[in-house]
Amino acid sequence: MAVFRSGLLVLTTPLASLAPRLAPILTSAARLVNHTLYVHLQPGMSLGGPAQPQSSLVQATFEVLDFITHLYAGADVHRHLDVRVLLTNIGAKSAFLPPLPSSVQNLAHPPEVVLTDFQTLDGSQYNPVKQQLERYATSCYSCCPQLASVLLYPDYGPGELPVESLDVPLPSTIRPASPVARSPKQPVRGYHRGAVGGTFDRLHNAHKVLLSVACILAQEQLVVGVADKDLLKSKLLPELLQPYAERVDHLSEFLVDIKPSLTFDIIPLLDPYGPAGSDPSLEFLVVSEETYRGGMAVNRFRLENDLEELALYQIQLLKDQSHKENEEDKVSSSSFRQRMLGTLLRPPYKRPELPAQLYVIGLTGISGSGKSSVAQRLKGLGAYVIDSDQLGHRAYAPGGPAYQPVVEAFGTVLCLCCPDILHKDGIINRKVLGSRVFGNKKQLKILTDIVWPVIAKLAREEMAQAMAEGKHVCVVDAAMLLEAGWQNMVHEVWTVVIPETEAIRRIMERDGLSEAAAQSRLQSQMSGQQLVDQSHVVLSTLWAPHVTQGQVEKAWALLQKRMPQSP
């Protein structure tokens, strides 16, 4: 069976009858489409008559909104699919409702196949019906020239459910802030302008519900606030968030695809209120269960500034049926970022100058990140670990390769303001040496120009020892890996991250430092974000030890699969 990159699913069954069949329909579609699946709702349309069917307006009722939510929730089990419910023919109740477009709508990923749930009498791939389907699809949307068509029935369950409407209402997922009880058939009101906000990291199906409801409510313009800068600091694993520009690109493509008639104003959200708190032309705000209190706060802020309250529409969270330990039970970007831990984020470096029999990992992280504990876990799985701190001690030791150059560069001054860098027994006092170079870039460069090349040479000697012991993976544990340029002698950089507040707590507890001293130490290093931006694999020790162990084992197993196999 052919598999297509993009497809269009035309749903013709009345919604009440369609909802129970939706899961098998999506499963059938997911077997045929592996990237983008557009969904077009046209309940009640027949493809079996002599006349060519035309797209007609679907009244936006709460039943329609609940169905769209139900569809996105059901699609979440097919995470390889980017599902997009097209809203061009779905209209809210409004005196200024624009007419249906007469021209063909362009899509970002022109469908290669059109699918439908329409049932032929005998369940066959009846050619006249398929031709009607293809003509209908191309009359509405830009499709690939060689458009294929597939009738999904009876693959999604012949005879399992009655064809007639089951009249079982879907669970209510949209709650307008109104004292009037909503009913499924109640039309949804349309507004000129409204707003919605979020982080929109790795645009997922819960985001799509929020955005779809906002697009149906808005008839002219939708303001979309995208969290940035200070609003990202409290996020879980912020180092793995997509850059603002990338999030906006994905968001913009999705919005223009689903409702091109709207004007979208996508702006950075830099404070909790955003434009919703100050724009007098806005009429509604779409929020989730989690952000409803924030929506109420926006309205209080507006009232304090003599602006009218916004109509609030609260969207129920989508449940994540496959969430794991420490993940949220809702569909969440935070969970997606957690699942990235231990996976390969970018292609490994090609290092033909390194021994062919040895694969080298550079392990780094900010102070207090738990990097050394991860190194020990990797050692337990069979890696040869090179501790750069231990190599530093060897380099500084009397007779070591860095000893004499350091003594000559920094001398032995015998005054109170600048004490001798040597102990009485001739050993370099690294604490005194550190105080000499701390905050002095020139002096620090003199020291690192001496010591870093020496440590790199010692590390290469250790790699030879690893090969002699028959090891295939070598881990260079080095806090200054990237600053020293040692990524040039590894195939992959692995970084251990934790929130800065947790790093400060650990440093204070471990080293007996004050909070200010711990912060100063972190500020003298590359940030977690800077490290992650150059990393191939990211891990975190934020949770219980067994969770860290699980991450390391996952990363190790994936590493074994991509390592060059020994001849």
Image: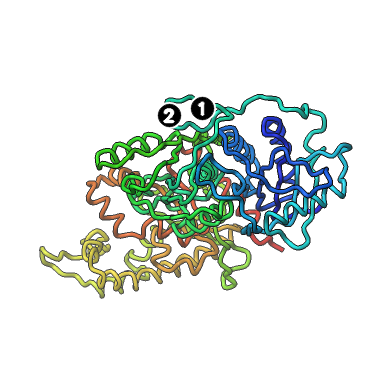
Name the secondary structure under disc 1.
loop
Q: Is residue 500 in view from this perspective?
A: no
Where is residue 89? Give x, y as percent. 62, 47
Closer-to-camera residue (104/319): 104
Image point (31%, 55%), residue name: 522
Q: Which amino acid does label 2 sit on?
A: Ser
Image point (63%, 59%), residue name: 106
Closer-to-camera residue (90/202): 90
Q: Is residue 134 left or right of residue 336?
A: right
Where is residue 316? Give x, y as percent. 50, 33
Q: In which quarter of the image is residue 163?
A: top right
- Whether pointer 2 and pointer 1 mark residues with C-beta atoms closer than 8 Å, the reply is yes
Q: What residue type is labelled 1?
A: Arg
Vertical placement of 126 versus 521: above or below?
above
Q: Which mark is residue 166?
A: none
Image point (62%, 49%), residue name: 82
Vertical placement of 318 versus 466: above or below?
above
Residue wearing tag 2: 178
The type of colouring in the image is rainbow
Callout 2 crowding tier (Cα within 10 Å): few <14, some 14–19, many ≥20: few
Q: Is residue 230 left or right of residue 88?
A: left
Q: In this view, does 5 lie to the left or right of 344?
A: right
Q: In which quarter of the image is residue 140?
A: bottom right
Q: Quadrant of residue 19?
A: top right
Where is residue 385? Give x, y as percent. 50, 55
Closer-to-camera residue (454/174): 174
Q: Residue 182 carries which label?
A: 1
Callout 1 crowding tier (Cα within 10 Å): few <14, some 14–19, many ≥20: some
Q: Is residue 171 in view from this perspective?
A: yes
Name the secondary structure under disc 2.
loop
Q: How far apart are marks 2 and 1 (CA)?
A: 9 Å
